[in-house]
Image (spheres, rainbow, N blue to C red):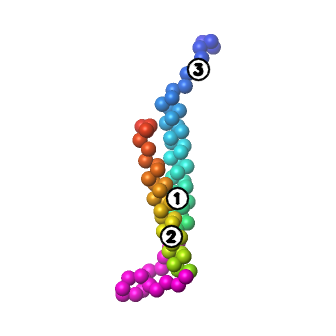
Amino acid sequence: MPEVPHQICVFHVLKEITKAVLHALAKLRKELAAQIPKLPPARRAGGRPRQGKESKAKTRRVKRLKQRLALLSSTATCSCVGT
């Protein structure tokens, strides 16, 4: 039937878009998690070791990366389209 127009199912289009977006977010989360540097273990009895300027900057960078990762994780929980 060549005269019949092709219909597009809105549900399946939204499902494919959602799947693509969630895949991109998962990839970005993995990349950000790989950027988080490993911190050295604490050596003092009171908890954290004494830190110089470089160590403090590294700790701040780790905190920022973890915050970004948490933000991305929280934005990926959309329930508007069922899978």
Q: Label 3 neighbourhood size at 10 Å, few (<14), some (14-19), many (20+)?
A: few
Q: Position of residue 56 (x, y in %)?
A: 51, 78
Query: Residue at (41%, 41%) from the top-left corner?
Result: 79
Q: Position of residue 58 (x, y in %)?
A: 53, 75
Q: Quadrant of residue 57?
A: bottom right
Q: Amino acid at mark 3?
A: His
Query: Residue at (50%, 41%) from the top-left corner?
Result: 18
Q: Which residues are magenta?
A: 37-53
Mark 3 or mark 2, earlier in chain: 3
Mark 2 falls on what kind of element? helix
| Label 2, label 1: how far apart the Cα atoms are | 15 Å
Mark 3 falls on what kind of element? loop
| Label 1, label 3: how far apart the Cα atoms are | 39 Å
Please name which of the two marks, 2 or 1, marks the residue nearer to the observer: 2
Q: Label 1 neighbourhood size at 10 Å, few (<14), some (14-19), many (20+)?
A: few
Q: Which residue is mark 3?
A: 6
Q: Quadrant of residue 78?
A: top left
Q: Amino acid at mark 1?
A: Lys
Mark 2 or mark 1, earlier in chain: 1
Mark 1 falls on what kind of element? helix
Relative height, residue 3 to residue 78 (above, below): above
Q: Which mark is residue 30?
A: 1
Q: Position of residue 31 (x, y in %)?
A: 55, 60
Q: Which mark is residue 62?
A: 2
Quadrant for the C terminus in the image: top left
User: Is label 2 in contact with label 1 (beta carbons under 8 Å)?
Assistant: no
Q: Main secondary structure of the magenta part?
A: loop
Mark 1 or mark 3, earlier in chain: 3
Q: Residue 30 colored magenta?
A: no
Relative height, residue 83 to residue 70 (above, below): above
